Image: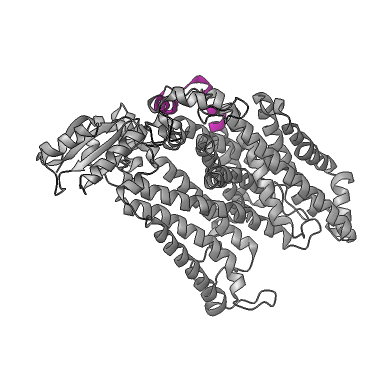
Amino acid sequence: MSQAVYGLMAEFDSPGAVLRAAEKVRNAGYRRWDVFTPFPIHGLDKVMGYRNSLVGWVSLAMGAGAFFSVVFLLWYANDFDYPLVVGGKPMFSPPMTFVPSYILMILGAAVGALLGMLGINQLPRLHHPLLGKKRFELATRDRFIIVIGANDKKFRDEETRRLLEEIGGANIETVEDVE
Amino acid sequence: MSEIANIEELKKLALPAELRRAPVIEGNRGLGWLTDKLSAFAEAKVPLWWWILFVPAAFSAAVIFPTCLFYQVFTGVGVWGNNHPDMWGWDIVNFIWWVGVAHAGTLISAMLFLTRQHWRTTIGRMAEAMTVFSVAMAGLYPAIHVGRAWFDWFMFPIPNSNGNWPQFKSPLMWDVFAVNTYLMVSSLFWFMGMIPDFAVLRDRSTTRIRRAIFSILAMGWTGSAWQWHNYEKAYVVLCGLCTLLVFTVSSIVGLDFCTAQIAGWHATIFPLYFVIGAVFCGFGMMLVLLTSLRKLCGLEAIITRSHIDKVAKLTLLSGLCIDYIYLMEIFIAWYSGDPYERWVFGHRFFGQSYWYFGWMMIGVNVCVTQLLWFKKVRSNLLLLFIIGVLINIGMWTERFVIVVGSLYQDFLPANWGKYHPTIWDIGLYVGTLGAFFMLYLLFVKFLPVIAISEVKGAMPQGDPHHPLGGAQKGGH
């Protein structure tokens, strides 16, 4: 196991404190850093500079794909491959396809939302350097943790540690990269 | 908000007691306390009451259920009471009943999320679990009701050696897709909601095996801002989709009926009727589960009386909607001038058979529900539990009145005949009830029964713009 450094982590004890600290880290010019919280914090998206999540688009694409595939399937099944007359109605008409395609659109969009979320978040993953830290277990409890990555261009062990101290971080620790 | 610096100043500004909103969580505790409280039950030793409830449920699920299921599948639908003219009996009644129970769960967790009701965070997970398990029970009935269950795959568009395809113009066919989609989407929604809470249990775990299980379930969740950002988007999208499902699944079940020519079924109100009935029935089940689990799991500070009061109010609202629909159904039967319609509706209440079910339906769904107008009733948990049970029975009789009450005397006297359920009908229903409660008890004991991360976000301690959440003078 090599002991390469993954980054530095610091703890904060309230969502308000971590939000202020995050603003300062951003203003200090860091780019490879993240905030780990037990629940989503209102306003953090803006501080981190995230645009609208792509998950919605993945969901839309899967939903629309499912919708039109089912329209095609119904045309193929009931009109083209095995024409079936039911009650003298046309073999194929858009209204007849609506209900099944609408339902499977919901299924497709829902699967798209879940897979999109997992994919964009790069989950599932079996391990993460942070999950090896004992103090990091508090990030799902009542602590709010800022991690500045060692791969950030501005990362200097001393300087970054000082910044984290200045913005009120407690229990500053080095996170080892596990390989 | 900008001038508030600490709790003392906040107290000075507080509204008089009557105008204040009840807090989501009672007692103004911290996030750590909340985490301990919410995970405590899943981590503690299995209590005695759990075994007392679990053993009969598991017996019913593991013995009665498969016995009745296999006997019916091996022998045929004839073992049930279904026979000409009552080709639909308890199987379809129970199918609609189980689908109905599911609906309130989706309504609570998805629609109340979209309308930003913070109190839903404490009961949403329980409601979702109710949905998943009851849809699974519902899905079983049509699958075996077809008679030859090993031909169920005919219902799916699979290329086969017969060279034929399902007939997609029928609502019965749409049902296959609707129920399966409902099961898949609600399980998916339920699972996704639990990912951050699996991470909580993973980080709290003390034994290797618990850690391994919850690590796999949490899938490496770290709770980074980026993960939450995408998670919240996916959650809101799924809520929107689940809300659509509340309206589609029961509508399609309603269409199964109203496309038939039978008097009593052939009405355009049916899709809406079934949606409202489903939601009402589900709220009844929710009252039963909430009032009992709150006490048994020691969650009085989390599922507060104010939350139960709100569920009771929603039950009343959906009950009033269903009362209106009963009234309309009877009015239209009279107004249509159709002698067969009038005959069927007259016989629902004054016929020779099953009239008592008609009155039971009115007695419970119309009369008992009105008790919920009173605050005294809404704050009496035992009474709410009883009302919840009664609503479930009342809604079951409503479905019986619709299904059997319309079939047993149709246009020709040659098609008149009585319906009696057999021991296998009853056994299968008891079996599904057992399976439902067994699954629910397993969920309550081993999984995060309350959405831990959502509750935290709904508390003042979780709001970065609130003094308790660490906001300083000037907003944050």
Q: Quadrant of the C terminus of chain A?
A: top left
Along the horizontal axis of the image, is B137 left or right of A52?
right
The residue closer to the viewer here, B454 or A24, is A24
Above or below residue B134? Residue A89 is below
Above or below residue B437? Residue B96 is below
Q: Residue furthest front?
A: B3
Above or below residue B154? Residue B419 is above
Q: Is residue B41 magenta?
A: yes
Per the picture, the main secondary structure of the magenta-coloured stretch is helix
Q: Is residue B34 magenta?
A: yes
Image coords of residue B126 (percent x, y): 52, 36
Tell me, yes or no, if residue B108 can be seen here: yes
Along the horizontal axis of the image, is B467 left or right of B341?
left
Tell me, yes or no, if residue B352 can be seen here: no
Image coords of residue A55 (percent x, y): 39, 56
The colour mode here is one colour
Image coords of residue A127 (percent x, y): 24, 42
The residue closer to the viewer here, A149 or A116, is A149
Tell me which residue sits at (52%, 42%) in the image.
B128
Residue A56, by quadrant, is bottom left
Along the horizontal axis of the image, is B170 left or right of B457?
right
Q: Residue furthest left?
A: A2
Q: What is the span of residues highlighted in magenta in the rendered image?
A: B33-59
Residue B472, by quadrant, is top left
Tell me which residue sits at (55%, 59%) in the image.
B177
